[in-house]
Amino acid sequence: PLLASLGLAALGWVLPDLQVRSNAHAARVEFTRSVAAFVDMLAMARMAGEGANTAVTAAAGVGDSWVFDRLRTELAGRTRRGKEAWQVLTEVADDLDVPELGEVADLVREAGDAVAVYPQLRARAAALRASLLADSKKQANEATQRMRIPMATAGLAAFGLVAAPPILRLLQVT
């Protein structure tokens, strides 16, 4: 009982940590996908001539997922804290460990109120989408690789079931 208790305690210690890490990774991936959409909206707002702070706030107001809710909440408190929108984006990026949002914040900071940032924002959004697509393909390839051994084993078992009766008949005849 003591060893079983220690083993279960160790399992109870490790499993929640693994689950939280897995959930955090999934949340970061979702956040990155939403950042790609956010950057597209930000680029359009900047192209329309809106200032940096207004464009960031408008882009955050477009989506209805938890990502956009978080951005809206953080940006709403911006004026009370006396910060620029790019500073808030940098804080959220650091908080959630999403460097892609930090890169967008740097673009907004460097551009200021210049509309010329539109091509850079569109290129950043395209690069984010390409990166996400490459990650998805990589995960799909890894899943395919993991399935080869079980599928080969199942195929050999099916072949054995089909081939066994004729082989046994041949062995009985001789």
Image: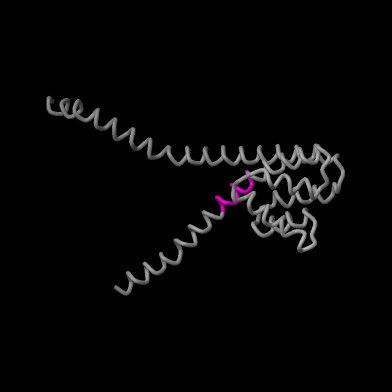
* 63 horizontally vs 140: left or right: right
Residue 145 lies in the magenta stretch: no
x and y percentages locating residue 131 in the rendered image: 65, 40
Residue 155 versus residue 107 in the image, above or below: above
Q: Residue at x 61, y 37 (%)?
A: 133
Q: Residue at x 72, y 44 (%)?
A: 59
| Viewer-closest of 77 and 14 | 77
x and y percentages locating residue 137 in the rendered image: 56, 37
* 35 horizontally vs 45: left or right: left
In the rendered image, which quarter contains the N terminus?
Answer: bottom left
- Please state the total of marks drawn on the protein image: 0
* 146 horizontally vs 27: left or right: left
x and y percentages locating residue 41 in the rendered image: 72, 40
Residue furthest left in the image: 173
| Viewer-closest of 62 and 127 | 62
User: Which corner quadrant of the image does residue 58 belong to?
Assistant: top right
Residue 28 lies in the magenta stretch: yes
User: Residues in magenta?
Assistant: 25-33
In the rendered image, which quarter contains the C terminus?
Answer: top left
Residue furthest bottom in the image: 2
Residue 170 versus residue 112 in the image, above or below: above
Looking at the picture, the colour scheme in use is one colour
| Viewer-closest of 17 and 10 | 17
Residue 167 versus residue 67 in the image, above or below: above
Q: Residue at x 52, y 38 (%)?
A: 140
Helix, strand or loop for the magenta stretch, by majority: helix
